[in-house]
Amino acid sequence: MYVAVKGGERAIDNAHAWLAEERRGDPGVAELGIAQIREQLALAVARVMAEGSLYDPDLAALAIKQARGDLIEAVFLIRAYRTTLPRFGAARPVDTGAMACDRRISATFKDLPGGQILGPTFDYTHRLLDFALAADGMAPPDAPQSEASAGAMAHVTEFLAREGLIQPEAQGSATPRDLTREPLDFPADRPLRLQALARGDEGFVLSMAYSTQRGYGRTHPFVGELRIGTVAVEMDIPELGFAIELGEVVVTECETVNQFTGSRTEPPQFTRGYGLVFGQSERKAISMALVDRALRWEELGEDNVGAPAQDTEFVLYHADNVQATGFLEHIKLPHYVDFQSELELIRRLRAEAIAGQAREAAE
Amino acid sequence: MSVTKPDPETDLRRARLSTLARAPADRLCALFAAYAPQSPAHDLLRPPEIGTVMVRGRAGASGAPFNLGEMTVTRCSVRLASGAVGHGHVQGRAHAAARTAALIDALCQDGQGTAIEAAILTPLRAEAEAARAARATRAAATRVEFFTMVRGDNA
């Protein structure tokens, strides 16, 4: 039996009014502007864009403000907004080899062409709280500058590929499956898995990657290269008859070099894992590359050791934090009728059990 | 690509539209207002419209394409009284900038290309290059110079 219950409108309105007040906080403290969030909480903005699957720093900053800093709620807001927009088309795949790199490091080759460029990294900071930041109006000193070398930086994997030491990538279909347009369906090919990981929850993908390092589906990864920077987005425009650059996005890319595969006909080669995410987020990009590599066990002829990170359905069904939150949090909504039937059932069972005990005691 | 043979006009237009698409919206509108204080009369063939474009990557940077996520784009198409048609696309949500880009494209089809290149495109390119260089030189300053530690000898 389904019983509709109405009510609570005024309570809900009042709750929303209070929420708005709480969002603003103490009116004696200056209100946060969208531009302040975009410029000064840039890594939170990057995460919301990556998991919201929509590159627009101003919108992500607005979502963070509206969500009071709850990043998963902000991702939810961005996903909801995205569904209201028409899609004009698909861009050509970005050329990360032509990236204007802010950062580019390799853990495999010390003296790679183009060099190790640290960029604006937290690495090598001492993780001590900087109380100078608590003081207002402190402008940082200008960052030093050096002459930049012209030209694009080649990927490390290209050097390995030239010697045939690393597996070449399969070319695949020009139009990859899109899980925002069709339900997630298995078997999931690698492009679909990469899409799911790119928009997956950073914490979940991190934990899955970490589990492979701890032995649950070990893949022996080296970070061949990690780069952060700007790439152009180019699309063919039908009314023009040619392609133009529509803009540029900041992305983080991680290429791992993993242990070998080989066979009677193929000499041993390194294998690859790949991570690419919107914005600056190397934790996510490295995690994605490790999980991508773990999920490739079948095509690379490795054993399924039953590790969670090898289970495509497990990983892909649980990576999305908006889906997970929706299902998790729905149980806090009214379940009065469901619970009423449970209540009646347990009362009856208890009555029967007590009656049974009484009968036994009487005999 | 539907264009196969190189065509200098097309190359020029492609470069122009790419610069306009990446320009900061306010700056683009300000430069155009300075160039054409009276906005030229035009019909909107397609009013400014906000939408998305799916950005793609390649597995391993060189392999199968996959969908990375979308980005916001605003587009607009105009026709001038002369009949010249312009198409504007800009990154982000920016109605005025998309319309301005379309007007600039149309005016360039209408013989104003040289003047517009000088008044709008040249400063936009210079500013984009300065912004790029500002990051590139900071990145270059964080390049690691390795040196080999000399072992203490026991001489």
Image: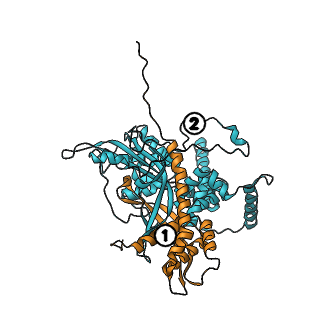
Chain colours: A cyan, B orange
Residue A196 vertical position relative to residue A149 in the rendered view, above or below:
below
Task: Name the residue beneath numbered marker 2.
Answer: A125
x, y percentage for residue A218? 38, 40
x, y percentage for residue B152? 43, 18
Query: Which residue is at the far right?
Result: A28
x, y percentage for residue B142? 51, 41
Residue B102 vertical position relative to residue A349 in the rendered view, above or below:
below
Which amino acid type corresponds to the residue marked 2 in the rendered image? Thr
Q: Chain of mark 2?
A: A
Mark on residue A116? none
- Choose mark 1 or mark 2, whichever is in front: 1
Q: Are marks 1 and 2 on the same chain?
A: no
Residue B131 vertical position relative to residue A265 in the rendered view, above or below:
below
Does residue B9 appear anywhere in the picture? yes
Query: Which residue is at the far top?
Result: B155
**How many discs mark residues in the rendered view?**
2
Q: SS of the residue at dot 1?
A: helix
Q: Is residue A120 left or right of residue A134?
A: left
Q: Residue at x 54, y 42 (%)?
A: A121
Alpha-carbon span between mark 1 and mark 2: 43 Å
Query: Which residue is at the far left?
Result: A265
How dense is the environment of label 2, judged by Cα within 10 Å: few (below 14), some, or many (20 and up)? few
How dense is the environment of label 1, judged by Cα within 10 Å: few (below 14), some, or many (20 and up)? many
Q: SS of the residue at dot 2?
A: loop
x, y percentage for residue B148? 42, 28
**Dividing the image into 4 quarters, which one contains the N terminus of chain B?**
bottom left
Task: Name the residue beneath numbered marker 1.
Answer: B16
Q: Residue at x 35, y 42 (%)?
A: A258
Q: Chain of mark 1?
A: B
Would you identify the image quadrant in which residue A263 lies?
A: top left
